[in-house]
Image (spheres, helix red, strand yellow):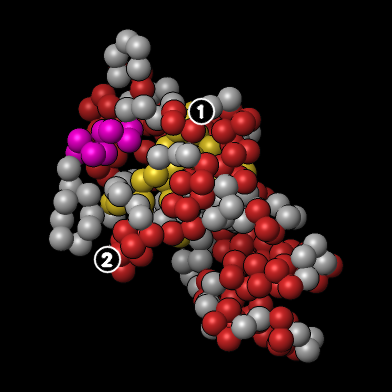
Amino acid sequence: MAASGIETDPERLLDLIRPARVVLWDFDGPICRLFAVRKAEQVAGELVEWLEARGLHGLMSGPERESLDPHVVLRAVDRRQPGSDLAAELEERLTQEELRAAATAWPTAYADPLIRTWTAVGSRLAIASNNSPRVIREYLTGRGLLSCFSPHVYGRTGNLRQLKPDPHCLNRALNAMGAAPASALMIGDTPSDFRAARLAGVPFLGFARGDRHAKLLREAGAGVVVQSLEPLLELLRAGAGPRFSGPGT
């Protein structure tokens, strides 16, 4: 393993890939950079401003207001006013921002061919994300990838308490696909992805865009972290997928 905490041992990656009959993907990060042009920090700030303009400054703590994460803002409001019209309206505002962002999202390097290759070698794929399923489907359709996942796209619901790290979307995917947790693999890029996978009993592969994100995943407990999807693609093309794992596996 490299000093940065990035996995360099192909055997460690193979140990995750070979048993994976089902691969659960987080969306924003491993598949694309959703807020590549209009940044998530800007969206979070505008959500906070929208709340404050309505005299709702007190719904969030200082750290929540300063988090620069739209999902932190959403959780904060739902925590204080669960199931409220306010929370629903805020969620729809975020969905509209995500829809706009999907048009300019940057594909993660190697994600498209990896998704197609993993499908071709016999694994089934699903999305387990905190983003809106409307947004996810729109992006995947534009990339010609929806058929690799459909109908198994599990995103944010009206019950905001079920956002990751709650394992709800992972459990929905596993139940719908009739898959045991040990036969699956979760690819995620945040500590909340790791915690959700751990609660669901699903093996986890961390994807980090840089050393800082790798450090956060490591500190959360992720055992295997990569900064590129290319090694996974190379292993699958070399025969690491389930179709080639041999009898009884």
Question: 30 and 71: which one is in front?
Answer: 71
> Most extreme residue toward the top, as rendered?
247
Please, is residue 81 above or below residue 140 in the view? below
- Is residue 12 a member of the stretch shown in magenta? yes
Q: Position of residue 52 (x, y in %)?
A: 72, 87
Query: Please, what is the three-letter code of the amino acid marked with disc 2?
Result: Asp
Question: Mark 1: few, some, or many residues within 10 Å (few <14, many ≥20)?
Answer: some
Q: Residue at x 77, y 65 (%)?
A: 82
Residue 118, quarter of the rendered image = top left
Q: Residue at x 54, y 55 (%)?
A: 165
Query: Please, what is the three-letter code of the amino acid marked with disc 1?
Result: Ala
Dominant SS of magenta comes to helix
- Is residue 115 a member of the stretch shown in magenta? no
Question: 213 and 100: which one is in front?
Answer: 213
Assess whether mark 2 and mark 1 are in contact (beta carbons under 8 angstroms).
no
| Left or right of 136, for residue 212 | left
Q: Which residues are magenta?
A: 10-17
> Residue beneath label 1, please?
180
> Residue beneath label 2, please?
211
Q: Position of residue 88 (x, y in %)?
A: 78, 64
